[in-house]
Image (cartoon, rainbow, N blue to C red):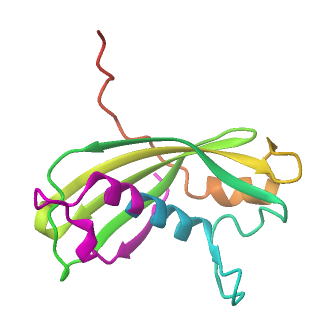
Amino acid sequence: MARPYTCTIQARIGDVNFTGHVDNVEALRVVDEARMRFFGLRSPRTGEHVAGVMDDLGDGLLPVVVAHRLEYHRELLPSLAEPYVVRVWVVRVGASSLTLDTTISHAPSGPEPAVIAETTLAIQDLSTGRSTTLPTATRAALETHLGEPLTLRPRPVG
């Protein structure tokens, strides 16, 4: 497997819900923030740029989330002293879409990932509002992070 993108994201006081563990919406926020860091960030106000795999996507093209699936393998416990450790990698690159897998680990919750996620995105042409083909340079950058997909639980039937 290619080396996943790894980052730390600071836990926040507001991550905790009334039951005393990290809220499911906040877990999705962590998945989303790690994805944005992996893709690369550019501030529309300051122009500040953090490099990422979508740097060559091109003007007028945008990766748009079309599906998320999260699984909670253990309780994600709050701790402001320990950041979340998040790993992101690419598991599929299609003509105009891609799929990422993500894990969230947090020392107070144990050594194994507490949350695993799958995110599917389409590349949207902002001028038409329709999906469009991934540029060759972006595809190549994504493929350097290609790895094995996580095994998600089967969906319940019935």
| Relative vertical location of residue 83 with respect to residue 128 in this rendering, above or below | below
Residue for point 78% across, 60% down: 137
Q: Residue furthest right?
A: 127
Q: Residue furthest front?
A: 18
| Res. 30 image quadrant | bottom left
Q: Where residue 114 appears, x then y in whole percent?
A: 22, 54
| Relative vertical location of residue 104 with respect to residue 72 in this rendering, above or below | below
- Of residue 64 and residue 145, the one placed in the foreground of this image is 64
Q: Where residue 98 appears, x then y in whole percent?
A: 62, 44
Residue for point 76% across, 48% down: 124
Q: Is residue 92 left or right of residue 17?
A: right
Q: Is residue 1 left or right of residue 27?
A: right
Membership of 129 in magenta stretch: no
Residue for point 67% across, 42% down: 97
Q: Where residue 90 appears, x then y in whole percent?
A: 54, 50
Membership of 27 in magenta stretch: yes
- Of residue 11 and residue 139, the one placed in the foreground of this image is 11
| Relative vertical location of residue 154 with respect to residue 11 in this rendering, above or below | above
Which span of residues is magenta-colored?
Answer: 1-29
Q: Where residue 106 appears, x then y in whole percent?
A: 21, 66
**Quadrant of image for the C terminus:** top left
Q: Residue furthest top?
A: 158
Residue for point 66% across, 88% down: 48
